[in-house]
Amino acid sequence: MNALKSLGKLVWGSKDNPELFKLTSGVLYEVNPAAKVSRKCIFQDAELCIRRTDVQFQYQLVALRVFEEGEDELAASGDDADELDDECAFLIGVELKFMPTVVELAHGFKWVDVAAGDGAIEYEYIVEDATANKATRDAFAMAVARCAWERKARRSYTQAAEADVKAMLAQAEDDQLERMLNSVQINDDDIAAAVADLDTVDEAPLPAPAAAPAVHKWVLPAEPKETPTGEVVVSILGEFYMFDAETTVFTQ
């Protein structure tokens, strides 16, 4: 039995339970570069689960708000129901571009808001390592990839090769890189100006080499005609320098 099928037994659960896999604690953000506030907290405390739908081979990624004491009663009152939506649901498919992410050293997941059309709006679900370690996060990502594969292939994941399911995650990462590269705006005029600047540098005359400093020739005193004789009191090994009064430098 391969790892993918073993994963299914661990997280797919009973067919009577619509929730297949749940992360119990995290923060949900909406990321929209075009908005005044580009990263907005939607649910300060939220669960993230994979939910089975009534349509075969179709699943939802659902972020559920965890209400603090008293907030659920306020939401049920009706007046503020619109302001206190308790879930965000997304149909799982290749177009969701679900993938792991790291934000300011915190781990989690991100995906595209397909309803936005151009894919400019994304969602991030950031977890704490204490509540969802790497093994749990990897298992959740594989479970989402499996759902995306089933919807695309219209077959059970048990008929898929593990590499084909993992390719769903790899494809999302490749698409993310492509979107980042496409978002970089390069002006042709700026490129031409930069090339012209390089040509100008190449054509500029090289500065004349600096003149070599003059080598000072020392005039040493004549050797004594007689070598002094006597008893050697102290003998020290060292280096001998001469002081140049013109440059005020000691030289050997």
Image (spheres, rainbow, N blue to C red):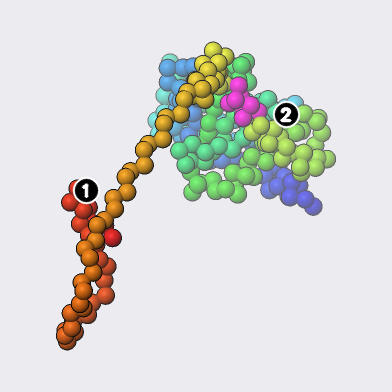
Q: Residue at x 75, y 33 (%)?
A: 149
Residue in front for this viewpoint, 238 or 123: 238
x, y (%) of residue 34? Answer: 49, 16
Say which label, 2 or 1, has the lower sequence index: 2
In-image side of 167 versus 119 (left or right): right
Taking the view exactly as shown, the residue that stands out farthest to the bottom is 231
Taking the view exactly as shown, the residue that stands out farthest to the front is 225
Q: Please identify the quarter of the rendering in which residue 212 is found.
A: top left
Disc 2, SS: loop
Real-space CA distance between mark 2 and mark 1, rounded to the nearest whole angstrom: 88 Å
Q: Residue at x 70, y 47 (%)?
A: 7
| Residue type indicated by callout 1 | Thr
Residue in front for this viewpoint, 60 or 191: 191
Visible residue check, residue 130: yes
User: Does residue 84 belong to the magenta stretch?
Assistant: no
Q: Which mark is residue 247?
A: 1
Q: Main secondary structure of the magenta part?
A: helix
User: Does residue 178 belong to the magenta stretch?
Assistant: yes
Residue in front for this viewpoint, 181 or 54: 181
Q: Residue at x 23, y 69 (%)?
A: 223
Magenta stretch bounds: 175-182
In-image side of 106 versus 113 (left or right): left
Q: Which residue is identified by label 2?
A: 58
Q: Residue at x 55, y 48 (%)?
A: 133
Answer above or below: position of 169 versus 82. below
